[in-house]
Image (cartoon, rainbow, N blue to C red):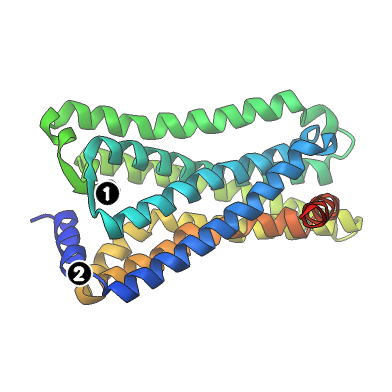
Amino acid sequence: MNTSSANVTVVLQYRDPFSKAVAKNLIVVVIGISINYINAGLIHTFCKHQIFYMNPRYILFIQLVVNDMIHMTLALCMFIVSYTIYRINVSICCICVLILVITAENTPLNLACMALECYIAICFPLRHAQICTIKRTLILIGLIWMTTMLSCLPDLFITLATVPLDFFHSKVFCIRKNVFANPIILEKRDITYILLLVTVWTTVFYAYFQILSTAQTASEDAKKARNTVLLHGFQLLLCMLTYVTPQLRDVLMQRFPQNSTDILFAFYIVIQVLPRSISPIIYGIRDKTFRGYLKKHLCWTVSNK
């Protein structure tokens, strides 16, 4: 029996008691809906005011928010399914896993682009409007999605070419290793993650230290940009935990099989929820312009009720 099958057996063997399962699902649902509600308010505020959708910085931000909403919603559904249905059709699982992986890989690339935009705005303020145009920002977002899709879709093609078609009509406990288990896919995943880690962290560190040197003698905006990039780095660190957690999770589940569901729950909160709760803080609370318009929107909503 391979590690993946062993983990599934452990999860099904040590199911949570009904009350504990309800409590966990309730916590996840409340947190997920709360974050998505806040993000929906950010998207509504963005769409209502031209000052935002004519600014590359906010366009990149709202792309991150939309991406996080897609990921959060699907991850929430998959969490509930893992407690209720347990096993689902492989074809459906493949689609869900691909969307989750694509949106997960989008986040660090998007954060790197936002860090670069901050760097250009602070270090090259006179050229910022020429470099960071709306058209180039939209092209950049398209490239982010294309890069992650080209990274993930080969997993599906390799699986289609190496497993019998009957496999796609069977049911599995839906995690990535259960549907994309080919050794070639695992090697490709590791190489992709290493390249992504190096590229993104190099970009963020470069932007941060360039802004840091400028902020020593520059305006308050430069110091705020430095703090923003630092927050991006922290958010990125949480997102990057996705790339090392499978191995750690498998080790913990084998070492403490009786706590397997608690381990999965803890990893879900830390890996799926926390990184996606920071975006509203960075712009929804810290950014004065966005905060002002968001307050107006919330006050208008409350007054209408």
Q: CA distance from mark 1 to mark 2?
A: 18 Å
Q: Which residue is mark 1?
A: 174
Depth order, front residue of 66/195: 66
Residue 259 x %, y %: 26, 75
Whichever of callouts 1 and 2 sits on the residue coming sooner in the sequence is 1
Q: Does 94 sit above or below residue 289?
A: above
Let me know if residue 237 appears in the view. no
Say which quadrant the C terminus sits in: bottom right
Q: Secondary structure at mark 2?
A: helix
Q: Does 5 sit above or below residue 187?
A: below
Residue 48 x %, y %: 79, 38
Say which residue appears at 55% left-offset and 46% top-offset: 69
Q: Amino acid at mark 2?
A: Gln
Depth order, front residue of 301/36: 301
Quadrant of res 302: bottom right
Q: Which residue is mark 2?
A: 254
